[in-house]
Image: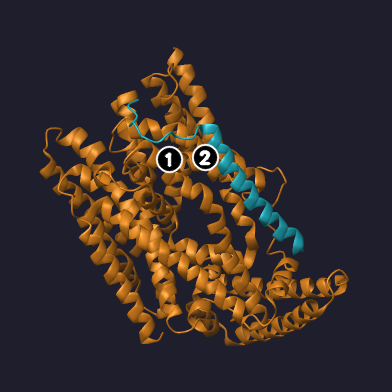
Amino acid sequence: VNETPTSKKRPSFTVVLIRVLTVEVVVLLLLGVLQSRYPR
Amino acid sequence: VHWINWAIVVAWLLYVSIDGIRRSKGTQKLEGYFLGGRSLPWWVVGLSVMATQLSAVTMIGTTGQGAVDGMRFVQFYFGLPIALVILGVTIVPFLHGAKVYTAYEFLERRFDAKTRSLTSFLFLLSRGLSCGTIIAAPAVVFSAIFGWPLLYSVALIGVPTVIYTMIGGVQAVAWTDVKQMVLVVAALVAVVVVLLTRIPVHPDEALRLAGAAGRLRVFDFSFTLKETYTFWSGIIGGTFLMLSYFGTDQSQVQRYLTAKTVDEARSSHLISAYWKIPLQALILMVGVLVFVYYIFVTPPLYFNPAQERSVRAADPAAYSTLESRYVGAVTARATAARALAAAHRGSDDAEREAFRASDVAVNTVRTDALKQAQTVTGVPSKDVNYIIPHFVLAELPIGLTGLFIAAVIAAAMSAVAGELASLSSTTVIDFYRRWVKPEADDEHLLKVSRAATGFWGLFACGVATFAATLGSLIEVVNRFGSFFYGSILGVFILAMIKRSRANGAFFGLIAGMATVGAVSFGAPQISFLWHNVIGAVAVVAAGLLISEL
């Protein structure tokens, strides 16, 4: 595969995965707080 | 509708059309027309990716779903961030690095022409029809509300989109998508603000009412293959669906191929990874707040005015009985809601129970009314799609109504434009240049590409105009489409496994589609999100086995 070279160092897969999952977990926690604060 | 609202809609349509056409600069070559010269900034690509997925159905159907079913639909997107990170290190660098025009072109380099042609043919078949349904959904709603012939509504959405996509190519699509996306988000936020000021109780109490009615139940942790919207189907089935959609569907692939570098292509995806779930939550929240609003303001028995007229005309006595039952139930619910809002938190069990019972009573009358409508019209009622349009036209201030109508049209246009560009690129690159005129020069191919965009635009408008007549055909094709979505992902997974061979990929694809078909007919209770998992796994297993032979 002929990847295009870049000047900036790219964060590794693990770092990106951790960042994205952290944001997702925070969003899901907020939705969870919404559900538990305003229950059925 | 006040003339100022129409002026806003017309101004917006003119603005995006002219802006789109202006972007035709640099599209004298095929690479400029289909891939924007592979030079678009990552944020433009990222917003364009989001705009393509956000159609008018999201603006009117998903918000309506929020009103009647609450927030749980958001679980559908739980797998999306995971899928985009996985794609960032797998398919995205493969396809971007291969310097291809279409995802399917890559399959010929890796396997053979028959695998490429089959996958691209399946794409054209399903996307061609789905493009028509994307126009049809809002067009049908507009026609019912404004009393226009369906053709006018189809033309309002279709004509400007076809013109700027035909002239400006993917560059026009991407840059107009950015503006459409800004308008859509602004309109949604504005509606939330208006709702919060109009609901006669404190926002905290409004959410308490929504919660008591079950509208804020986001998570369902039950592990069942039958239920479409659960945490697990979203995380597992949703990941496979999003891997397939973002990784192998030309309407998405074409977008990240326009990015300058692999890194920019990856970054463009991260916009969706971070923002898709919050955006969907916002869209559903609009519906939830509209539900709360209509606790205090008596909603119509039918939100679809055309349906109301039909039921009333068919049996006026039955209609007025239904209506008086409805008004009584809604009034009782409003009283119960005020009692719950005034009750002390923590010791409000009796008020909560009374409110829930009153909501069930309202729903019972609504269900009877919808059944009555189905008996009269002979088709299942889709009243849920008219809740938000009714609210927008009846309750929003002048100006904001126009902004919201423009946003619905914008959402439809951006989704259609992306699909037209991808249909055109697949037609020209995977069929015309591959099988008809391999020696054709850029100038000739560009002409054919513009003609192909125009053809698919007309085709989509035709399908949209006759959507009601074509209903069962579209359903068949959609069902057929679900057979190969996960299966095509399986072919791309095979492409990254060294041991797999051309025949393995081709016959593996057929085996995968047959497996999903068998599951779909043999066990119809299994939710479609799981079909993607089954298809992908079946193709990889069969493909590797056949490659060994």
Amino acid type indicated by mark 1: Arg
Q: Are marks 1 and 2 in contact (CB under 8 Å)?
A: no
Task: Look at the image and tell me whether residue B526 can be seen.
Answer: no
Q: Which residue is mark 1?
A: B266
Q: Quadrant of the C terminus of chain B?
A: top left
Q: Which mark is residue B511?
A: none
Q: Which chain is cyan?
A: A
Amino acid type indicated by mark 2: Ala
Q: Which residue is mark 2?
A: B83
Q: Where residue B78 appears, x then y in whole percent? A: 59, 47
Please give left or right for residue B277 compared with residue B366 in the image.
Answer: left
Q: Where residue B14 appears, x then y in whole percent? A: 27, 71
Q: Residue at x 34, y 48 (%)?
A: B41
Q: Earlier in the sequence, mark 1 or mark 2?
A: 2
Q: Residue at x 34, y 52 (%)?
A: B418
Q: Quadrant of residue B97?
A: top left
Q: Which chain is orange?
A: B
Please give left or right for residue B93 compared with residue B512 in the image.
Answer: left
- Dot 1 and dot 2 within a common chain: yes
Nearest to the observer: residue B223 or residue B226: B223
Q: Residue at x 50, y 68 (%)?
A: B188
Q: Give above or below for B114 relative to B31.
A: above
